[in-house]
Image: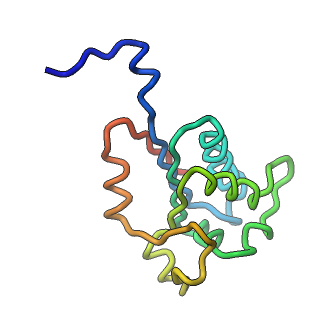
Amino acid sequence: MEPVRTPQTAQTTQKTLVIKVTAGADAPERCSQAFTVAAVAVASGVRVSLWLTGEAAWFALPGRAAEFELPHAAPLPDLIESILSAGEITLCTQCAARRDITQDDVLEGVRIAGAQVFVSEIMVDGVQALVY
């Protein structure tokens, strides 16, 4: 028999937000939105796993986020620092390989993992997945 969920217990159950960002400098507003949502969620106490895929893969490299500019948006390096402070950033294995990026190349705290790990993260109860 499952326990009855009351509004009180529902509020104390911590959810996880998994965000996949596929856009980079090629679609700056979409890219910035993903990082902003992830950073705000971390600041709100939500567990966050941010996945860098496609053109967003470049932001796993030191210095690349500093090159990104979007008027009226928080600086990408600040958002990444905030996310890594209490969340997780993962670079897609295939995206890394297509760009010749290795684990030795990426920012400290960024891991490289593949689709199997992504699927295992999003299939857990209490997870909300977003794709930008």
**Given the current orientation, which residue lies at the most extreme bottom position?**
100
Residue 21 vs residue 101, the one in the foreground: 101
* Percent of width and height locating residue 38: 61, 47
Looking at the image, residue 16 sits to the left or right of residue 4; the answer is right
Residue at image point 35% right, 61% down: 117
Residue at image point 52% right, 47% down: 48
* Percent of width and height locating residue 129: 45, 44
Residue at image point 50% right, 69% down: 111
Image-quadrant location for residue 104: bottom right
Residue at image point 62% right, 35% down: 44
* Percent of width and height locating residue 89: 54, 60
Residue 23 vs residue 44, the one in the foreground: 44
Image-quadrant location for residue 68: bottom right
71 in relation to 100, above or below: above
Colouring used for the render: rainbow
111 in relation to 22, above or below: below
122 in relation to 102, above or below: above
Looking at the image, residue 63 sits to the left or right of residue 39; the answer is right
Q: In which quarter of the image is the N terminus?
A: top left
Residue 23 vs residue 38, the one in the foreground: 38
* Percent of width and height locating residue 13: 41, 28
Residue 50 vs residue 10, the one in the foreground: 10
